[in-house]
Amino acid sequence: MVLIGKLNLNRKSLIVALTGAGVSAESGVPIFRGRGSMWENETARNLAGKSGPPWNTRGTWEFYEWRRELVSRCEPNAAHLTLVEMEDFFYNFYLITQNVDGLHHRAGSRKVLELHGNMWKGRCPRDGEIVDLPKTPLETIPPIHSCGEALRPHVVQFGEPLEQKTLEAALDLSRRAELFLVIGTSGVVSPARDLPLLARKSGAVVIEVNREPTVLTPYVTLSIRGMAAEILPKLWEDLKKTIN
Ligand code: BV8
């Protein structure tokens, strides 16, 4: 690809990757929108229908336990692993994810900003303490915090603000990125969807990897059509050849 050849990257370049549900699709984790989405599954639809504010009820946890159990049977795929390789290679590589499945951490990524939280953690609505909940099934549903209050999933729901420091860090990285990769996201959820647009406006080369065009496609530098687990390793091989 001509564009890749023109990138003037080195190991100190600031590289940012934003991922969505599509990066986990080939691991068997259902996406949110379009074909193969979670909503094609009747159980998910029924359980999601019982989930809702105040987000620390039995109904919410039955929905998230269904997802946690499903994800516990999934393994990181070649796309997750390629992002770990890139983090190991570049001194300044950062991963920003919308996913709450924890697969980037399981793959070995360390510098990860989780915009929407993580389903393997709970948060106390009373005192805000965050608790690791690594095992599924949970001993009790809902899980109870040491203060006696039922925990909620440490996940950002629609209409809730993202953690301020996480969002500010993501915005700062997007402003300073030289190369910004957008992998497996439909680009419909804000403020995540604004990050690649900010990166492009700030002068980054923005490369999208998606099996289909998205609302972001017209605004990126290059949109590569295909499955992340197949495209990303190849893209990384091409990038490596250009690095001095
Ligand atoms: C906030 C919960 C402010 C966690 C999630 C009207 C207009 C515009 C905006 C709004 C509006 N009304 C409300 C808003 C704001 C709202 C929003 O953006 N709504 C959208 C839907 C219109 N945003 C919010 O509410 C956010 N908060 O703005 O707060 C605020 C400030 C102060 C005070 C109060 C409030 C909160 C957003 C977080 C929402 N939480 N989920 C969970 O249970 O998971 S969002 C949900 O969508 C997931 O987290 C998911 O990560 C996220 C984004 O989806 P994608 O990851 O992109 O997944 P999707 O299925 O859509 O797409 C998959 C893509 O992969 C597709 O493109 C597909 O083609 C591709 N693909 C599939 N397979 C592959 C592949 N690509 C490559 N390879 C493959 N193999």
Image: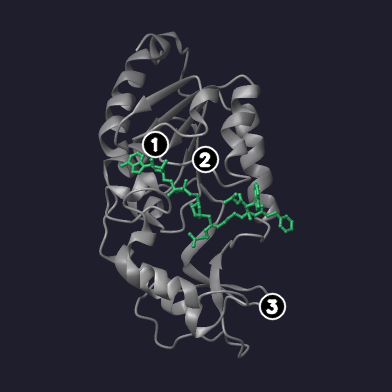
Please tell me whether mark 1 or mark 2 is closer to you in this view. Answer: 2
Residue displayed at 44% across by 8% down: 6
Check the image and report above or below for 54 versus 140: above
What residue is at 31 percent from the left and 19 percent from the top?
A: 238
Q: Is mark 2 within 8 Å of ligand 1?
A: yes
Q: Nearer the viewer, residue 66 or 41?
A: 41
Name, please, the residue furthest toward the bottom.
Answer: 148
Q: Answer with mark 1 or mark 3, whichever residue precedes in sequence.
A: 1
- First in sequence: mark 3 or mark 2? 3
Q: Which residue is mark 3?
A: 127
Whether residue 36 sits left or right of residue 92 in the image: it is left
What secondary structure is marked by label 3?
loop
For marks 1 and 2, give the CA distance.
27 Å
Which residue in the protein does label 2 denote?
A: 187
Is the residue 96 above or below the residue 11 in the image? Answer: below
Disc 1 versus disc 3: distance between alpha carbons? 36 Å
Residue 148 in view, yes or no:
yes
Instruction: Describe residue 125's horizontal placement relative to residue 63 as left or right.
Output: right
- Name which residue type carries label 1: Asp
Estimate how packed mark 1 is, as few (under 14), some (14 to 19) or many (20 or more) residues with alpha carbons within 10 Å.
some
Q: Identity of the amino acid at label 2?
A: Gly
Residue at x 50%, y 50% (from the top left corner): 98
Given residues 47 and 81, the one toward you in this image is 47
Numbered disc total: 3
Between label 1 and label 3, give the one nearer the viewer: 3
Residue 83 horizontal/vertical position (percent)? 38, 38
- 79 in relation to 240, above or below: below
Residue 88, numbered label: 1
Image coordinates for residue 71, horizontal then vertical, percent: 32, 63
Give the amino acid type for the residue marked by disc 3 in the picture: Asp
Screen quadrant of the C terminus: top left
